[in-house]
């Protein structure tokens, strides 16, 4: 919504705030038009989740410890080092030798323009997403989804 510091949600008279302006853990939400991305109406809504919540243990097992690209969102230094090591056959000290560690917000992409092409690739079977879904849970079980992720037992839970 407008950056006025106000919440558009409340429960029992107390405000509930958005997470990054979208409230993606809500069953219903009110968002600023700038947060809305139009996607193909042919896409099943149950398949329209494109983020992957990584568990380093699961990723390492699936990829023999290496990935082409690694994205870390928490800002926790140990997670940042792990993300760097998974993406490079090197030690973080090699940053001093010219390797780059880039910090961005939302991966430096433009969702309004980039997400429709991701949806198109998925619909054309150029992008496999189902293999990342390890659990399907009820929305009321969202805490179980986080527990599975933290234990390294769930790569992506759909709630």
Image: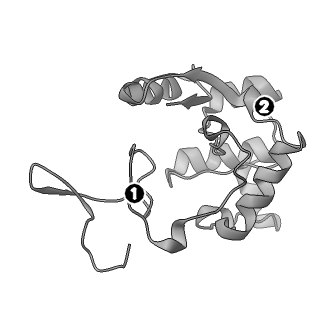
- Pick the residue in front: 142 or 74: 142
Residue 62 at x, y = what percent? 78, 25
User: Taking 140 as reference, is 114 left or right?
Assistant: right
In space, the residues marked 2 and 1 are separated at their CA atoms by: 31 Å
User: Taking 103 as reference, is 43 left or right?
Assistant: right
Which quadrant would residue 114 be assigned to in this image? bottom right
- Pick the residue in front: 77 or 151: 151
Residue 78 at x, y = what percent? 55, 45
Viewer-nearest of discs 2 and 1: 1
In the displayed structure, 29 sits above or below 131; it is below
| Residue 78 visible to the viewer | yes
Which residue corresponds to mark 1?
Answer: 19
Q: How is the image coloured?
A: one colour
Which quadrant would residue 23 be assigned to in this image? bottom left
Q: Residue at x 72, y 56 (%)?
A: 93
Q: Residue at x 75, y 35 (%)?
A: 129
- Pick the residue in front: 17 or 117: 117
Q: Residue furthest front?
A: 41
| Residue 90 visible to the viewer | no
Helix, strand or loop under label 1: loop
Residue 121 at x, y = what percent? 85, 49
Instruction: Indicate which disc residue 136 carries.
Output: none
Which residue corresponds to mark 2?
Answer: 65
Q: Residue at x 50, y 51 (%)?
A: 74
Q: Residue at x 45, y 30 (%)?
A: 146
User: Taking 99 as reference, is 58 left or right?
Assistant: left
């Amino acid at each position: 919504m407008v950056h006025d510091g106000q919440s558009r949600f409340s429960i029992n008279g107390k405000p509930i705030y958005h997470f990054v302006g979208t409230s993606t853990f809500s069953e219903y939400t009110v968002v600023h038009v700038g947060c809305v991305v139009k996607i193909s109406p042919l896409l099943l809504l149950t398949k329209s989740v494109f983020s992957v919540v990584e568990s380093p243990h699961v990723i390492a097992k699936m990829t023999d410890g290496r990935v082409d690209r690694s994205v870390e969102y928490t800002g926790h230094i140990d997670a940042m080092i792990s993300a760097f090591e998974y993406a490079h056959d090197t030690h973080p000290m090699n940053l001093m030798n010219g390797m780059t560690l880039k910090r961005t917000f939302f991966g430096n992409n433009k969702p309004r323009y980039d997400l429709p092409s991701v949806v198109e690739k998925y619909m054309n079977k150029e992008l496999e997403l189902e293999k990342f879904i390890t659990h399907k849970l009820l929305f009321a079980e969202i805490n179980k989804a986080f527990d599975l992720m933290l234990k390294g037992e769930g790569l992506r839970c759909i709630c």
